[in-house]
Image (tube, rainbow, N blue to C red):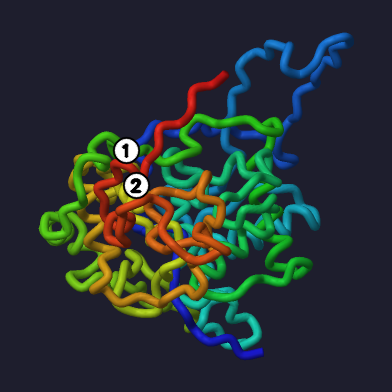
Amino acid sequence: MVRGALAGMLALGCLTTSTLAFERWTLEARGKSGYDAPKLEWVEGKTINEIKNPTIQYALPKFEGDVFWDTINAKPVVPDSIYGEFVQYGYELFVNTQAVIGPEVADPNMRYSGNNLSCNSCHLGAGTAKYAAPLVDNHANFPQYRNRENSLGTMAARVNGCMQRSMNGYPLPAEGKEMKAFLAYIHWLGQGIPVGAKIEGRSLKTVDRKMVQQNAADVKNGAEVYARDCASCHGAEGEGLRRESKDGKPAGYEFPPLWGSDDTYNTGAGMYRTLKAADFIKSTMPKGAPTLSDKDAYDVAAFINDYSHYRTVKLNRQNDFVDPKVRVPDHDQPGPYGPEGSYIFPDEGKTQMDYKVGPYKGIIKQKPAAK
């Protein structure tokens, strides 16, 4: 089947954002066989909640080359086995997505991604960078409840969510080689992390939630911030900077486009949401020096995702976050919250623009006190 190009990326993704601005996870050589699993004692007569385990330290599996600065030329150090081959292929898919399953590859049946971004555009350092949407604990935390779909999601479903939204494309076959490779790479990254563990740096840093409750994002200031701090890499019109192909294969972007074409994330991606984008920008941008103030990150996120900027529309977004109790505050579509399932916004007196750019007072709810 020939797959057309669409547009998207689960993250606002500045492709080569430096991780040197963050304290890295410890790098540790582990030999050819990978992680040396610890032995755990089985304690009789107690439950897991009663056991006080010592702190578990996480170190990245070993990479050859610089996975932070030169992801294209780095590679995992893995066993010489079928498992190792799948991990290597998963890494290639992750950092060179456009060259393997992008919209310009020679085989039309491999055009699963609808844009020329890579997974690394958002999950920086090939999914290893702290506070930059890392994937190191994903294997240990799936399956998990997904509020967007209001269902128990698998890791494979999460990958395909990115494919259809951030990559603006099509789902991978569940039993296909590419899906197995993605899952193998994510599994390899998570060596030694126990089920349910929460690793430091797993989430984005957040802009001040009190600020966003009291203030709408200032799109005009966001345009000024973009011109000052972002345009030199991402282009004055958000067009990004493409790499020059050296082997005839699609080379992708050195700095990804943020709007203006089908070659970026679509309106269903997490990065289309103002607060999610603001958190990503605060955590990772500008390249090598994530120093923007919370206000500037908030404002420039609103500017990048402004309704005046073209991007591919993801259909049926009104069916995201159908449970209002777990709806995110910056989802700018109504849901089936009205009489007989009619589509309305959940908060009285709030308009679409309130959900898009704030202020979020009355939308961000105080969590109930634990009983």
Vertical relation: 141 (above or below) 302: above
Give the percent coordinates (x, y) of residue 70.
43, 54
> How many dots with numbers?
2
Point 46% across, 39% down: residue: 203
Q: CA distance from mark 2 to mark 1?
A: 6 Å
Q: Is residue 14 left or right of residue 83?
A: left
Q: Which residue is mark 1?
A: 21
Q: Inspect this view and state whether residue 42 appears.
A: yes
Give the percent coordinates (x, y) of residue 247.
48, 79
Determine whether label 2 and label 1 are within 8 Å by CB: yes
Q: Is residue 248 left or right of residue 14?
A: right
Seen from the viewer's position, the closer of residues 301 and 148 is 148
**Residue 86 appears in which quarter of the rendering?**
bottom right
Please identify the quadrant where the N terminus is shown: bottom right
Vertical relation: 73 (above or below) 24: below
Callout 2, which amino acid?
A: Ser
Give the percent coordinates (x, y) of residue 251.
44, 74
Q: Is residue 143 left or right of residue 12?
A: right
Q: Secondary structure at mark 2?
A: loop
Label 1 packing within 10 angstroms: few (<14), some (14-19), many (20+): some
Point 43% across, 56% down: residue: 122
Callout 1, which amino acid?
A: Ala
Q: Which residue is mark 2?
A: 18
Q: Secondary structure at mark 1?
A: loop
Point 46% across, 42% down: residue: 129
- Residue at far right of view: 44
Seen from the viewer's position, the closer of residues 25 and 198 is 198
Give the percent coordinates (x, y) of residue 173.
72, 71
